[in-house]
Image (cartoon, coloured by chain):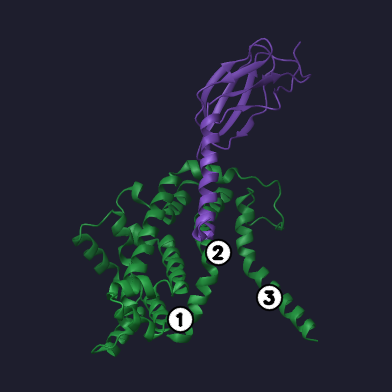
Chain colours: A green, B purple
Amino acid sequence: MPRRRTFLRHANLIGICAVMLLPFYWVLKTAVTNENIYAYPPRLLPEAPHLFNFVDVWYFIPFPRYLLNSFIVSALVVAGNIAFNAMAGYALTKNFPAKRAFLLLFFSCMLIPFQATIIPAYLITSQLGLLNSYLGLAFPLLSTIVCIFVFKAAFEAVPQSLIDAARIDGLTEWHIILRVLLPLSKAALATNVVLAFIWSWNAFLWPLIITREPTMQTLPLGLARFLSYLEDTTGALYAFAVMVLAPSIFVFLMAQREFIRGLTSGATKG
Amino acid sequence: MAPWLKSRWVTVPLAIALTVLAWNAYVAINAGGKVEGRVVDAAGRPVANASVILLERHFVMHNERQRTRTDGSGYFQFTGNDNHSLQLEAEAAGLGRSERRAVRLWFRAQNVSLTEPLQFSAQLP
C-alpha cells in the first residue's frame, strides 16, 4: 500500500513537473527550429532541428559584449551582496537600541517597489558619477533586504558559544564573520549568490535608464534591441531567450541544494 | 589532489573554460573565409565559365557580396568571406540561373566546401 502511494505521489509530481516545464520545452523547441509558435496544429516534437539560430544571435548583435557586461555586473552584485548582507545580517543578530525599529524599517522597505525609488536611485547614482558604468549598473542591487534576513537567520543558528570562543581566541568581529560564520552558513551564501545573480541578470529597467552607450548594455536590453531588429524571426528570438536564460539556470542548478536549504532555514528561523 | 579541486564549483567552470578554449582554437584554425564548390547542369556535367554569386545575410536581407567564375571543371572558389549566413547562386548563358542555395556556417569566415554542387535545371547543349 505505501509503495502504491509512493508511486502515485511520484506520478503526480512528474505530471506537475511536465506541466511546469512545458513552456521551457516550447521555448527550446522553437529555438532549434524556425517554426512559428502560432502554427496550427502545434507539433510536440521539433522538425529538422538545428542550432544556426544561436549562431545568428551571436553575430547579428554584439552578443559577446552584452554577455560580458552582464557577467561583470552580476559578479559585482554577487560580491556586494555577500559582503554587505553578511555584515548587515551579523549586525542584526546583536542587541542594540532601537533594533525592533530597524527591523520594522527593513520590513517596510521591502514593501516599496523598485519603480517607486528609481528617481532617487538615479539621482544618487548620478551624484556619485556612476552613470553609464558597471558599478552604477550594479549599485541598487548591491544589497537586498531579503538576503540580509537569510544571513541573519543563518548566523542566529550558529551557537553563541562558538562566537564567544572565537572572541576569546582574539578574533575581531570581521574575522568572526569571515572565518566562523560564513564557512558555517554555506546554504545562506548559496542563496545569496543565486538570488543576487538572477536578480541582476534579469534586471531591465535600471540598466535601460542609466546606460548611455550600446557598449554598456546588458543582455535583457540586447534582447529588446534584437526584437526591434528581427521582428519576425521567431526561432532566433527564442534562441536569444535560451542564451539569456542559460547562465541563471546554470547558477541555480549548481547551487540548488544549498539554495533550497538556505531558503527553508530562512523560513523557519526568521 | 586537494579537496577543493574536486568541488563542482571548480570542475564545472573548468570544463566549460576548456571547451570554450578548444572551440576557439578550432575556429582560429578553420576561419579562412574560403567558400568552394562546383556547378553542374541538369545532367550533372560540369559547367565552365558560369558566374557564381555569393550573397550574405544582413538581418532580414541577403545582399550580393562577391562574384566569381567557374573553371573548366565547374569548380569555383571565393575567398575573404566574413559572414556566417550565405546564399550561393550560379548563372550561365543558355542555362539561366541555378537554385539559390542557403549555406549556414557555424562561425564567421568558416572554410566550407559544398557537398552538393549548384545545379542548373537546364542541360548544356
Read off the residue under disc 1. A266
Read off the residue under disc 3. A13
Which amino acid type corresponds to the residue marked 2 in the rendered image? Answer: Leu
x and y percentages locating residue A3 in the rendered image: 78, 82
In this orientation, does residue A122 appear? yes
Residue B87, above or below A158: above
As helix, strand or loop, the secondary structure at mark 1 comes to helix
Instruction: Identify the residue at horizontal 31%, vertical 70% (top origin).
Output: A84
Which amino acid type corresponds to the residue marked 3 in the rendered image? Answer: Leu
Q: Earlier in the sequence, mark 3 or mark 2?
A: 3
Whether labels 2 and 1 belong to a single chain: the reply is: yes
Q: Earlier in the sequence, mark 3 or mark 1?
A: 3
Query: Callout 1 environment at 10 Å: few (<14), some (14 to 19), or many (20+)?
Result: many
Instruction: Identify the residue at horizontal 55%, vertical 28% (top origin).
Output: B55
The chain containing the residue under callout 3 comes to: A
Location of the C terminus of chain B (image quadrant): top right
Label ID, residue A253? 2
Between circles 3 and 2, the one closer to the viewer is 2
Q: Are marks 3 and 2 in contact (CB under 8 Å)?
A: no
